[in-house]
Image (cartoon, rainbow, N blue to C red):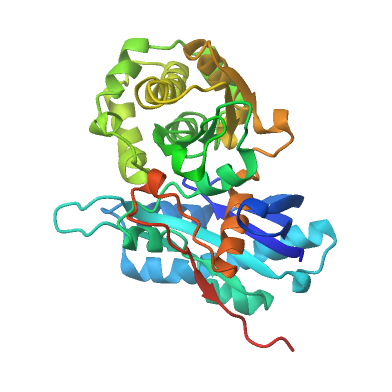
């Protein structure tokens, strides 16, 4: 039976709430999904500022976290109504909503007295009440309960949608953070390799905001005007994260505001364009480094498919093609998919698996001890 659903994603880049309206049928390897409409609903500037505030230990406070949980729930409900309105489909016709939520903090490993844990906010009860639609949320916690890192979760949906009997594929998402799913030719779910490669757009966006007063580097135009300081970018790879063997995940905890502030202070002698160019090269270099160390020795890759906001950065794509000359590098659009909608669609698929009682993590990617059913289900009140 075909179902109508909306997948919601608000990532670490805070560039808006992505809402994908999809038609979905089946589950597991029989899943079929069609994107009907996609919209990005902006996050108000004051709300973005509050989110960034609670993500930093030195400025966070529990009252603001509590308040934002409900405020974001209302914004997510608005995003659902917006994408449905634009598509000309009443939101009351939805069968379910998948909400990833906004990650506030992610601790993939025990840190001193802090237990490994993760927190996404955006109260699902608010979404369910405002729309009258069942909501699936809180996708990461069950994987962590099973000993995993709670990330990455998209590899399962990548396997369902992109597996091939003819070629090995790597799907590289470049959002705030970069992450890759490797699908060996003719492989099973157990054969996939997936992990976070390092920063995606996070550092680039922060530098653009600081120096240019803009939210991101459109088409990579500022990076193209700068000079790459290759030795500096290579020195940034000395972080312990890049030495860790997958499965591994990272986030704003490592590459957030404090990291960018330190770069700006340390390299104050560089021009703004040079620092943006070098940060862009750092993202490309961290991706290439991850492939050389952890992917190529294990399996053959024929195609690299780039998704996420970074796929629109022409300068970044040029750098990747130079660093990985033996790969055919494509974008999601080149193969008939949407780079911007990819993750929102993925969580709609994960929610569909949850509602069908199916496990949808990939232990090979997250480190979990077993496959588990992801997500919590919030039912709405009875519709009038």
Q: Nearer the viewer, residue 72 or 295?
A: 295
Above/below status of 127 relative to 328? below
* The image quarter in which residue 276 lies: top left
Going by the image, does 154 lie left or right of 291? right
Going by the image, does 248 lie left or right of 291? left
Q: Nearer the viewer, residue 171 or 99?
A: 171
**Percent x, y of residue 172:** 52, 32
**Percent x, y of residue 240:** 23, 32
- Name the outermost residue toward the left: 112
Let me know if residue 325 appears in the view: yes
- Position of the N terminus, as image quadrant, is bottom right
**Percent x, y of residue 306:** 58, 30
Above/below status of 253 relative to 264? below
Above/below status of 126 relative to 116? below
Going by the image, does 336 lie left or right of 300? right
Going by the image, does 227 lie left or right of 347? left
**Percent x, y of residue 156:** 52, 48
Picture residue at 38% right of the left edge, 21% below the top:
297
- Name the outermost residue toward the right: 88
Picture residue at 45% right of the left edge, 25% below the top:
299
Q: Nearer the viewer, residue 345 or 271?
A: 345
- Position of the C terminus, as image quadrant, is bottom right
Picture residue at 72% right of the left edge, 58% below the top:
24
């Amino acid at each position: 039976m075909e179902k109508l659903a909306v997948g919601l994603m608000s990532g670490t880049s805070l560039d808006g709430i992505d809402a994908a309206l999809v038609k979905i049928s089946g589950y597991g390897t029989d899943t079929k999904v069609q994107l009907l409409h996609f919209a990005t609903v902006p996050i108000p500037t004051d709300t973005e500022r509050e989110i960034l505030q609670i993500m930093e230990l030195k400025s966070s406070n529990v009252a603001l976290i509590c308040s934002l949980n409900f405020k974001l729930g209302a914004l997510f409900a608005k995003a659902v109504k917006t994408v449905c309105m634009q598509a000309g489909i009443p939101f009351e016709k939805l069968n379910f909503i998948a909400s990833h939520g906004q990650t506030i903090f992610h601790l993939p490993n025990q840190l001193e007295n802090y237990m490994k844990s993760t927190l996404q906010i955006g109260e699902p009860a608010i979404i369910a009440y405002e729309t009258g639609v069942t909501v699936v949320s809180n996708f990461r916690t069950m994987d962590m309960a099973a000993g995993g890192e709670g990330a990455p979760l998209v590899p399962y949906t990548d396997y369902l949608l992109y597996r091939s009997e003819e070629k090995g594929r790597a799907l590289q998402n470049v959002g705030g953070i970069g992450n890759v799913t490797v699908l060996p030719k003719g492989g099973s779910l157990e054969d996939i390799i997936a992990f976070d490669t390092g920063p995606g757009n996070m550092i680039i966006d922060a530098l653009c905001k600081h120096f240019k007063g803009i939210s991101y580097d459109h088409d990579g135009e500022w990076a193209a005007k700068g000079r790459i300081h290759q030795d500096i970018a290579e020195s940034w790879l000395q972080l312990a994260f890049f030495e860790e063997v997958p499965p591994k995940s990272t986030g704003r905890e490592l590459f957030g505001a404090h990291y960018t502030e330190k770069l700006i202070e340390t390299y104050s002698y560089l021009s703004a364009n040079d620092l943006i160019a070098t940060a862009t090269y750092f993202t490309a270099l961290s991706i290439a480094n991850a492939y050389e160390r952890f992917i190529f020795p294990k399996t053959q890759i024929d195609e690299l498919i780039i998704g996420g906001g970074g796929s629109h950065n022409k300068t970044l794509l040029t750098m990747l093609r130079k660093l990985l000359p033996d790969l055919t590098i494509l974008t999601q659009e080149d193969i008939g998919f949407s780079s911007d909608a990819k993750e929102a669609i993925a969580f709609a698929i994960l929610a569909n698996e949850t509602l069908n009682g199916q496990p949808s993590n990939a232990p090979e990617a997250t480190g979990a001890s077993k496959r588990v059913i992801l997500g919590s289900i919030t039912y709405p009140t009875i519709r009038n």
